[in-house]
Amino acid sequence: MFNGLKKLVLGAAAAVAVAMPGVAQAEEFTLEGKTVTWIVGFREGGGTDRLTRVLQTKLGEHLPGNPKVIVLNKPGGGSVTASNDFHANAPADGTMLIMASTSGLLPVLLGSKNARYDPNEWVAITGFARGASLYAISDEIGLSGTDMMADYEALKSANIRFGTETPLSAELLDFVSMELLGGVEPRYLFGLSSKDAEAAFQRAEMNMNTDNTRSYLKDYGEDPKVNPVWSYGVIDESGNLVRDPDLPNIPTFPEFYEAVKGEAPSGPGYEAQKAFMNAKVMLSKSVMLPKGTPKHIADVYIEAMKKVTADPEVAAALPREIGSMPLNFGEDTQKALALGTAMEPEVRAWVATFLKERFDTSLD
């Protein structure tokens, strides 16, 4: 009888193990004695690199086996070079991850042939939204900061100088936003990285710039000579666009548009603007494992990143990088990624026409 009961118990245990393979595998998974390589597709010192290194300091402590975690910078093509290599070659054993960013998502969103990767095949761990705003030297543009209609008229008559890298940079969100307003004709100066464009703005060689909200507040929050034109807001848990929590008194772009046009924005151009906003703000940075990574490894990383971001040292540093924006994990990040890399054919056609007519640039 005892032997029969023993067989029954062992059989039930085996059935549970088969039914819940992730649990058993998660208990066995360890990175002891291994090195985890965290890919960053940009040079040292930029926003993506800084955020990665803040998280890197604690990640090894919260992964099984306490592996060494190193950051490997692989700049090129606005992170496309690193993303291509990661997609093709990264091992799916938990020893390599990438910090994806807007610059790597835009080529996918636009259907560029240079992007030989699909981030939707990667396994999402954590997403970091980061506010963004368009701002200007008030006196040069003629901004009032209080009257949106007056500011719109000022934008139409101003000699706007805006520095950026290429027509396909993350600033495409700003290009499309100003295009939708109509009558606003910025002079774009290409060949400037975001760092160089910011330096040119500080020298007043440029009189308009765009950046994440925290950088704007740090550099110009107390400067009366520089003011935001609009922010890009944040999408709340109900799916509604609301004001940037770090710029609660600044209108979002749709608010600005409706105030000066008398109606809410709509049409394929606005659908493109929303897609670019999602890619730039809601998916500013995201931690991803390679395609094919087993679920039990992904689950371990999700729990580790929850602990890392809750660590007092990291939690104190995060606002300097992402402001007050909410974090998302796992399935929520994967859903945001799907939205941020999808564009209907008619919307992509609108973007292609806009880029060709405005910048003589092709999506290919």
Image (cartoon, rainbow, N blue to C red):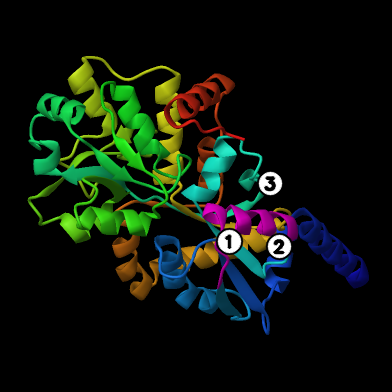
The answer to which quarter of the image holds residue 273 is: top left
Question: Which residue type does callout 3 highlight?
Answer: Arg
Q: Do the residues labelled 1 and 2 touch (CB within 8 Å)?
A: yes
**Quadrant showing the C terminus:** top right
The stretch drawn in magenta includes residue 64:
no
Looking at the image, which residue is at 92% across and 71% down? Answer: 3
Looking at the image, which residue is at 52% across and 36% down? Answer: 339
Residue labelled with disc 3: 116
Between the C-alphas of marks 3 and 1, the distance is: 16 Å
Mark 3 or mark 1, whichever is nearer to me: 3
Range of magenta residues:
72-91
User: Could you classify mark 3 by the number of other residues whose Cα lies within 10 Å: few (under 14), some (14-19), or many (20 or more)?
Assistant: some
Question: Quick check: 296 left or right of 100?
Answer: right
Which residue occupies the foreground of this view, 176 or 13?
176
Q: Do the residues labelled 3 and 1 touch (CB within 8 Å)?
A: no
Question: Quick check: 109 left or right of 84?
Answer: left
Question: Quick check: 161 left or right of 74?
Answer: left
Between the C-alphas of marks 3 and 2, the distance is: 14 Å
| Residue 290 shows up from this direction | no
Residue labelled with disc 1: 98
Compare marks 3 and 2 and give the one earlier in the sequence.
Answer: 2
Q: Where in the figure is residue 107, as x and y percent of width and height?
A: 56, 42
**Up-down relation of residue 238 to residue 97 (above or below):** above
Q: Residue furthest top?
A: 262
Element at label 3: loop
Residue labelled with disc 2: 90
The stretch drawn in magenta includes residue 83:
yes
Question: Quick check: 95 left or right of 150?
Answer: right
User: Could you classify mark 2 by the number of other residues whose Cα lies within 10 Å: few (under 14), some (14-19), or many (20 or more)?
Assistant: many
Question: Which residue type does callout 1 highlight?
Answer: Ile
